[in-house]
Image (cartoon, helix red, strand yellow):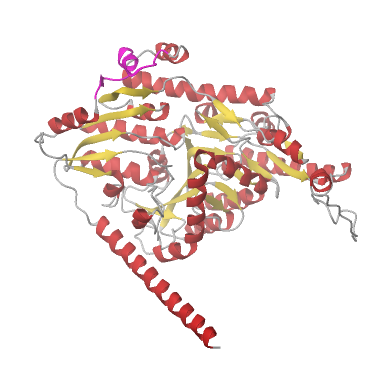
Amino acid sequence: MKQFFKFVLATIVGVFLVSIIMLIIVVGIVVSASSDSDKPVDDNSILNISFKNAIPERTPNNPFAALSAFGFDENKSIGLNDILASIKKAKTDDHIKGIYLHDSYMMGGQATTEEIRNALINFKTSKKFIIAYSEVYTQSFYYLASVADKVYINPKGIFDFSGMSSQITFFKGALDKLGIEAQIIKVGTYKSAVEPYFLDKMSDANRQQVTAYLGSLYNQFLTGISSSRNVNKDSLYHIANELKIRQSEDALKYKLVDGLKYKDEVLDELKKLTKTDLKKDLKTVDLDEYAKNGDDQDGKTTDDGNKGPDNQIAMIYASGEITGGNGDDNTIGSDKISAAIRNVRLNDKVKAVVLRVNSPGGSSLASDVIWREVSLTKKVKPVIVSMGDYAASGGYYIACAADSIFAEPNTITGSIGIFAILPNMQKFFNDKLGLTFDGVKTGKYADLGDVSRPLTPEERAILQAQVNQGYNDFTQAVATGRKKSQEYINSIGQGRVWTGEQAIKIGLVDRLGNINDAIASAAKKAKLKNYNIVAYPEQKSLFKSFGSDIQSRISTHFAKAELGDNYVYYQQLKGIQQMMRTPQARMPFIAEIR
């Protein structure tokens, strides 16, 4: 008994100590966050920009940012919203003399890079300088850096300029070894999301569409570099095709960089540009710190439209795969997003809506739930869609009802189609595990979808009819929203993927433009001159995030640390499980573009 009480007392003391430690951490986060946001920008400063992490649509409300020293979140993410606002603000900020753009991986999609690139081009109209430097230039980072006044590379650096390639991972061989059959039900010749599960290479139709859209992306890439570097586009194609750049000296020879310099030489040049004593340190401010000092939009962006002033434009962020429920920061939960759209529709202070879509699609049912709210909102106030890297399949479904759709030339969109996958694991259970199943049922189709046996012809016909109906609903929604015939939408649908540049020619997109263009269009349609932008859905408070996200963040942290670059394949395998539950309206595959 004595030993028992000792254990109880030790447990109570342990819980008490842990509570105290957690309280200290939370207080530290609050103090750190408040002190960072109040940090002033010195005169004669340079805005220091380096992209080494994925770029989300908006900066996460991350309670672990202050704990980076403990390894909880060494990858501080800054959202595209704050990146664009900061570059725009720096243009007119007398404290900022120029931008130093360096050592970036550009893990975001190509449309995200395009938006940042255009913001930098706009920044240059201020006559302030942009200097780019790196030891390694990936093609994505060079596309961004090519707009700089001067582009430098380390004399021993690496410069990748070899053209684009797209690779798809096929799982059929692995499924065969396990004795698992992927039973496919789909509509759309080009709807090839299912191909990795029953083929070991690309179908002819899929190869055709990938060749077409990859060519469109590459054309945009070469056109942009040709314009900013004043090098003929055909010459650029030849340089890449023949792999002419193999050493850093080659990049200088072909006029893609302005000089070979070590970092200390670049820093000395920055000192001369800012008239800083060469013996003193440069005054710099990192992009994430600069973003905390406010923004430069037409009115302050808030997360609570009810407390803000009248004449608001609601910016609704729909980013990630589309699922049922509330979702999270990385997925579009139909309940959460539809509630946000419904709230702005009923809020008289909101005069127009910009729906920012960055999604490869997902659940067709969840997509339809969101589409319904967009359709209802369009009847009472303007709804403008701004497409990010992806607005494909379900991502296009939720966008098609808008008054107007903006996309970047290299946005991936379309993919109008539906599919379902149901695994037959009979051989896996019988031959690999030695398991057999038997039972009773009260109806002929009571066990429809049982993975322990193959579908019967009748069951397959029932599921195919459901998928056909989903495709009919999808094409009808697009036809209504785009004011086209359903027959025409079917002809450009069939699951085919298009770039924004291609989509505008076939009527799936209205204009090529960025987020700010969409906001300006919304303001014009609502006849607003002065307005505030209010962000939806509301992000969780620090304390709510701390409690709900700690387990998932820790598990994700260790998974990424353990798997490294292979983490993407882990995500793909998790996605298979989701796809095998309900009919899907998602992109035809996860394509890795290099």
Inspect the magenta stretch and tell me whether residue 250 lies in it.
yes
**Side (left or right) of 421 relative to 18:** right
* Total marks placed: 0
**Quarter occupied by residue 360:** top right
x and y, in percent, of residue 167 in the image: 58, 28
| Residue in front for this viewpoint, 162 or 143 | 162
**Figure check: 332 above or below 232:** below
**Side (left or right) of 583 relative to 26:** right
| Residue in front for this viewpoint, 147 or 528 | 147
**Quarter occupied by residue 157:** top left
Residue at the far bottom: name it. Answer: 1
| Residue in front for this viewpoint, 161 or 3 | 3
Indicate the quadrant containing the N terminus: top left, top right, bottom left or bottom right. bottom right
The reply to whether residue 509 is visible in this rendering is: no
**Figure check: 91 above or below 313:** above
| Residue in front for this viewpoint, 10 or 288 | 10
Q: Residue at x 44, y 60 (%)?
A: 348
**Numbered range of the magenta stretch:** 244-261
**Quarter occupied by residue 283:** top left
**Figure check: 575 above or below 135:** below
x and y, in percent, of residue 519 in the image: 40, 44
x and y, in percent, of residue 308 in the image: 35, 61
x and y, in percent, of residue 266 in the image: 21, 29
The reply to whether residue 390 is visible in this rendering is: yes
Inspect the magenta stretch and tell me whether residue 400 lies in it.
no
